[in-house]
Image: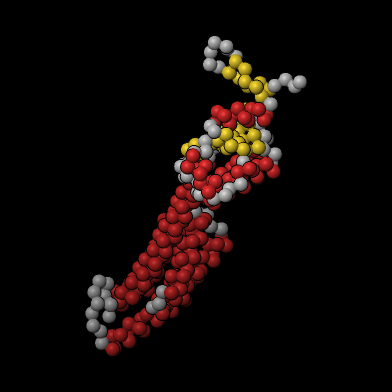
């Protein structure tokens, strides 16, 4: 017979007596099902453990949990408890239920079961002790299953939220690393710094096209001074970006092409005729001003301050 803390050898008659008592307990819990379940629900209401559940949900959940526990006691198997605990944990987390609600509800049910056994066997302490020896391990096992399922589900949700946050941060960093800056009306500057792989090149194109539409830009100066190298895939993607910008009515001027990159572009056969290139960023801005019809005039001939003004027609 299984004691509360130790395993001891039992005779066949003792094992048969234990089986008989177990069946008696199952019959008792099923006979008292409505009474004990209502008592359980009332106690959970009093403890505030049913917050967020509708009356219909309370009815359905309490019946299912009650019957699942009795089934585990009868069969000695916990597959049903495991499956239900997983579903309950998933729904609980999504509904925002707390660990106190889920585990507190099962602890309350365990107490309701225990008190019902005390009332039934309080005149026979030996039989009450034997009944608790059968019932308590089952109740504790179910509690452990539910607690573990809830912890695993909570860790899963936390992990998914963390991964989502990391993706959002990575996206924000990529956008910050390729900002399309509005210099003046219809003119954007896109400084690119760091390694430019195919994935980042695609993001760059998407970000740039949105910026062109939002700012109604006509000219974009794309400065790649800070790009250490460009492979054939990225080079072809830049050409496609230039073409896509042209479809939106914007001309792209590429500046800051390093000698090594120029040699690479020539060696891999990129169609440079489709790209306007200028030596440096200042030269690119000057070319953009020319395309937009701006001329630069000094606001203070003796000082460094300048402003761009639309050239007079004619």
Query: Viewer-proximal residue, 244 or 84?
Result: 244
Quarter of the rendering containing residue 279: top right
Q: Residue at x 67, y 38 (%)?
A: 250
Q: Residue at x 57, y 62 (%)?
A: 56
Q: Is residue 236 left or right of residue 293?
A: left
On the image, the x and y values in percent for residue 167 come to: 49, 49
Please say if 229 is above or below 131: above
Q: Residue furthest right?
A: 314
Query: Viewer-proximal residue, 313 or 85?
Result: 313
On the image, the x and y values in percent for residue 194 come to: 46, 42
Query: Viewer-proximal residue, 55 or 194?
Result: 194
On the image, the x and y values in percent for residue 244 come to: 65, 45
Quadrant where the N terminus sits is bottom left
Q: Is residue 10 left or right of residue 74?
A: left
Please say if 71 is above or below 55: below
Q: Is residue 268 visible?
A: yes
Quadrant where the C terminus sits is top right
Q: Residue at x 57, y 34 (%)?
A: 278
Please say if 238 is above or below 184: below
Query: Viewer-proximal residue, 47 or 115?
Result: 47
Q: Residue furthest top?
A: 302
Q: Is residue 114 visible?
A: no
Q: How many marks?
A: 0
């Amino acid at each position: 017979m299984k004691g509360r803390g130790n395993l001891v050898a039992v005779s066949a008659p003792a094992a048969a007596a234990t089986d008989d008592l177990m069946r008696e307990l199952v019959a008792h819990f099923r006979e008292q099902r409505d009474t004990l379940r209502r008592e359980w629900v009332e106690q959970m209401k009093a403890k505030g453990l049913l917050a967020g559940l509708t009356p219909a949900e309370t009815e359905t959940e309490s019946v299912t949990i009650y019957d699942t526990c009795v089934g585990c006691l009868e069969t000695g198997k916990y597959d049903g408890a495991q499956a239900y605990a997983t579903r309950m944990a998933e729904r609980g987390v999504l509904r925002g239920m707390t660990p106190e609600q889920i585990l507190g509800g099962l602890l309350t049910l365990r107490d309701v079961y225990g008190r019902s056994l005390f009332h039934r066997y309080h005149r026979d302490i030996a039989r009450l002790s034997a009944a608790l020896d059968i019932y308590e391990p089952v109740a504790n096992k179910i509690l452990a299953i539910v607690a573990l399922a809830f912890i695993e589900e909570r860790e899963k949700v936390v992990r998914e939220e963390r991964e989502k946050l990391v993706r959002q941060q990575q996206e924000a960093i990529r956008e910050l690393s390729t900002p399309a800056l509005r210099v003046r009306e219809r003119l954007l500057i896109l400084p690119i710094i760091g390694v430019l792989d195919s994935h980042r090149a695609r993001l760059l194109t998407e970000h740039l096209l949105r910026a062109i539409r939002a700012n109604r830009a006509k000219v974009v100066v794309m400065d790649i001074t800070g790009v250490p190298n460009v492979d054939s895939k990225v080079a072809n993607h830049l050409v496609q970006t230039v073409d896509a910008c042209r479809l939106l009515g914007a001309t792209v001027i590429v500046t800051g092409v390093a000698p090594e990159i120029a040699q690479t572009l020539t060696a891999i056969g990129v169609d440079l005729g489709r790209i306007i290139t200028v030596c440096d960023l200042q030269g690119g801005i000057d070319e953009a001003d020319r395309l937009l019809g701006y001329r630069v005039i000094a606001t203070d001939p003796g000082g460094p301050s300048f402003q761009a003004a639309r050239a007079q027609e004619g």
